[in-house]
Amino acid sequence: MNEKQGRQTIILENRPRIIASAGVVGKKEGEGPLREEFDRIFTDGRMNEDSWEKAESALQKAAIETAIQKSGKKSEEIDLLFAGDLLGQCIGTTFGIRDFGIPFAGLYGACSTMALSLAMAGVFVNSRAAQTAIAATSSHFCSAEKQFRLPLEYGGQRPPQAQWTATAAGAAVVENADNGVAIEAVTFGKICDMGVTDANNMGAAMAPVDVKIEP
């Protein structure tokens, strides 16, 4: 059963659990302070693929495969997969997951897609619409630059305030279980236009929204 609190928050009374999770990253992320926390670090930004988009699909596939393995389950035991990416029509996701054969709900929430997929998985598992679900997302610096600004081959100069999209993918297996981290509530946001027009400064557009959640 789901119980609403205010307009944006749903209390998950059955407290579905994250029973396994995985994170895979690119070379730059693997050199950072969180490197010991990742399940896999790809040193080749193309992941042996012939395009950035295919590389992103490989990232997400690796994250989901790893999460499923860590959960001790098989693909056919997963009822539903909630996932998305930053690319048009979620092509990074759809090509990455096509071999799993898991029922799929595509999501697009930009930088909030992992939180959104976890929220949806939590609500479905909590309500017993699914026993086991996966939440996943991915991004790739090179495919995102091509999608939102200019292809790297163009050679454009990035201004100092430009954010750097992560080359990474994450996945979590959510289930009604006794072990794991509980998802006790989920909050869905609203569209909030801060009037930022600089395509390189995504942080300025998104950060102020974090303090606008109504109690």
Image (cartoon, helix red, strand yellow):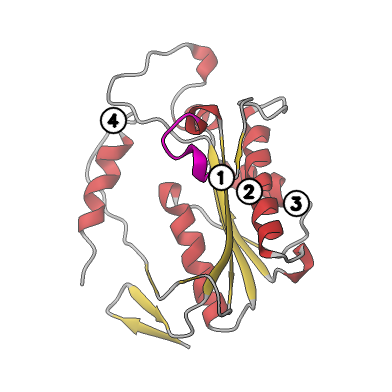
**Label 2 residue SS:** helix
Of tags 4 and 1, the one toward the viewer is: 1
Q: Which residues are magenta?
A: 31-38
Relative to 31, residue 40 above or below:
below
Q: Amino acid at mark 2?
A: Ala
Which numbered dot is residue 63?
Answer: 2
Q: Amino acid at mark 1?
A: Ala
Q: First in sequence: mark 3 or mark 2?
A: 2
Q: CA distance from mark 3 to mark 4?
A: 35 Å
Q: First in sequence: mark 3 or mark 4?
A: 3
Badge 3, how many Cα within 10 Å: few under 14, some, many 20+?
A: few
The spot of residue 33 in percent (x, y) is 41, 36
Q: Amino acid at mark 3?
A: Arg
Of tags 3 and 2, the one toward the viewer is: 2
Which numbered dot is residue 98?
Answer: 3
Q: CA distance from mark 1 to mark 2?
A: 6 Å
Q: Quadrant of the C terminus?
A: bottom left
Q: CA distance from mark 1 to mark 3?
A: 16 Å
Residue at 46% from the left image edge and 60% from the top image edge: 116
The residue labelled by disc 4 is: 198
* Magenta stretch prevailing secondary structure: loop
Residue 132 seen in render:
yes
Q: Amino acid at mark 4?
A: Asp
